[in-house]
Image (tube, rainbow, N blue to C red):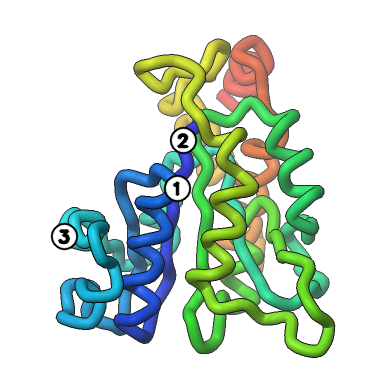
Amino acid sequence: MMLKVIVVGPKYQLNVGYIARIAKNMGVNRLYFVKPRADIHGKKAIMYSKHAHDLLSNAVVYNSIDEAVSGSDVVIGTTGISRVIRFAKMLSLEETLRFLKGKKARSIALLLGRDDTGLRREELERCDIVTHIGSSGGYPVLNISHALAILLYAMAPASKRPEKDGAVRGAINKRELLLLQSLFEKMISGKRIRQRRMVSNVFAKTIRRAGLTEPELHVLLTAFK
């Protein structure tokens, strides 16, 4: 599996630098940001990244979470506080690892929230699952760079590429998945649905979580067509 680390709206250059350093420690070769408030190329960010400043120089910046997670098989949100999320499974880190172990996912998007306010509820609801690290009940919220270190260390076995080209046997065609999504959206476009975008997001997440085989996908495409 390939792991895509996406940092949403980081505020402090110090954290940006530490995130780059930890990411490189754990073998991540590229970082992705969504609307960073801190200057990811700033002097302090570079200083605290130490020998990982190339990850900041080559970082990709997106304008939205939707853009950042596009094409990912599984989207994992993170939160410091265990809570009920309507349209995403809330799992402990241990449960998340078991979930990934049984999942035939080629790419995983890991979303880290803002270093002051975290991910918003509506952003967490776009994720397939939301994970949290069991920590002290008196002070459960970790610094995002510390949380990333724990997550990357725990997820490393799941994110290793099984083959040199990163391909996973049995992976289904991404274009066909996108076609299925577009067919669904076309089907609901003429319906009286108040929250059409939410319905579309829930369908997309359901399909990703299902881990469809190629024959199953073709059956659904035929039915929707």
Q: Classify 10 Å Cα crowding around label 2: few (below 14), some (14-19), many (20 and above).
A: many
- Residue 84 placement: quadrant: bottom right
Q: x, y percentage for residue 134?
A: 78, 67
Q: x, y percentage for residue 92?
A: 79, 58
Q: x, y percentage for residue 178?
A: 46, 34
Identify the amino acid type marked 2.
Met
Q: CA distance from mark 2 to mark 1?
A: 13 Å
- Image mark for residue 2: 2
Camera-nearest residue between 203 and 44? 44
Residue 14 relative to residue 90: left or right? left
Residue at mark 3: 57
Residue 84 relative to residue 30: left or right? right
Say which residue appears at 69% left-offset and 60% top-offset. Answer: 130
**How many numbered discs sit on the rendered protein?**
3
Which mark sits nearer the N-terminus, 3 or 2?
2
In this rendering, the label closer to the viewer, 1 or 3: 1
Do the CB atoms of the residues marked 2 and 1 lie less than 8 Å apart?
no
Identify the amino acid type marked 1.
Met
